[in-house]
Amino acid sequence: MNIAMNWGQLIPELLKTRKVIAIEMQGHGHTPYSDRKLDLANMASDVECVMNYLKVDSADIVGYSMGGSVAYQLTIQSPKRVSKLVIISSTYKSSGWLPVVTNGFKGFKPELFDNSPMKAAYDAIAPDKTKWTKFIEQMLAFVATPFDMGDSNIAKITSPVLIISGDNDGLDKIELAKTYQLLGGGVSADMAPMPKSHLAIVPSQGHVSLMMQTKTILGYLDDFLK
């Protein structure tokens, strides 16, 4: 989900051992802008529609950042479609982020991004470049909207889950530890079986730099998905 950040490096490596379906979400990449509300339920349903169209009954789902929240939502909405779930630097609730992250977007204006690498990337492949400002407004509204998929729904996930986080990626690590416990992790594996879900904290990494650690991310993915 989201051909952004470093997927261009990761996908060719993943293709050596598996089939990869890379989805560009609403308004992202080659997917046209839409006035439809940008929310997690809609985007998760989009992923399921793509799976239906391609006749894919179930798949391993990997999501980074916003894509990770979409992946959680898809797993809750349609658990049978998700074989294994990989969540990279993401959460299922707003409070999973540090307050500095959730508060940081509140003062942002669309013009702040006008000369950014994001704008250059948008102009390079967007079907309609005139939708840029509307797209940014939509994204800012999305990140400003609180969400919480519910601890009880996370605890019901039966798919094995791999959580990958940078040690300083903006996620609240206390909340992340609670998430891992909800998924059956955080046990003493010398006295009990090793959980089927895993947690990886990558040292000295922020939200953006984490996805640039191609070798590290691939190592975790290959080990978990094999």
Image: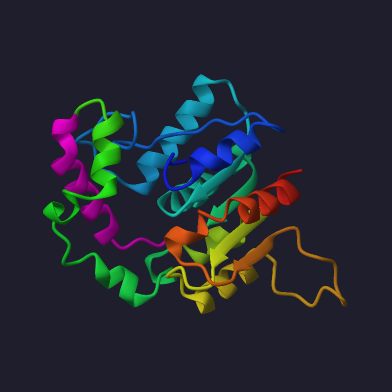
Q: Which residues are magenta?
A: 129-149
Left or right: where 90 falls relative to 16: left
**Image location (x, y in percent) of residue 140:** 22, 54
Left or right: where 224 falls relative to 165: right
> Does the segment drawn in magenta span residue 148?
yes
> Does the segment drawn in magenta span residue 136?
yes
In which quarter of the view is residue 105 placed?
bottom left
> What residue sits 60% from the left and 51% below the top?
86
**Image location (x, y in percent) of residue 151:** 52, 66
Left or right: where 174 falls relative to 130: right
In which quarter of the view is residue 24 placed?
top left
Main SS category, magenta section? helix
Identify the image quadrant of the C terminus.
top right
Relative to 191, residue 22 above or below:
above
**Image location (x, y in percent) of residue 25:** 37, 37
Q: Nearer the viewer, residue 8 or 149?
A: 8
> What residue sits 60% from the left and 62% below the top?
155
Residue 159 seen in the figure: no
Residue 72 seen in the figure: yes
**Image location (x, y in percent) of residue 176:** 54, 71
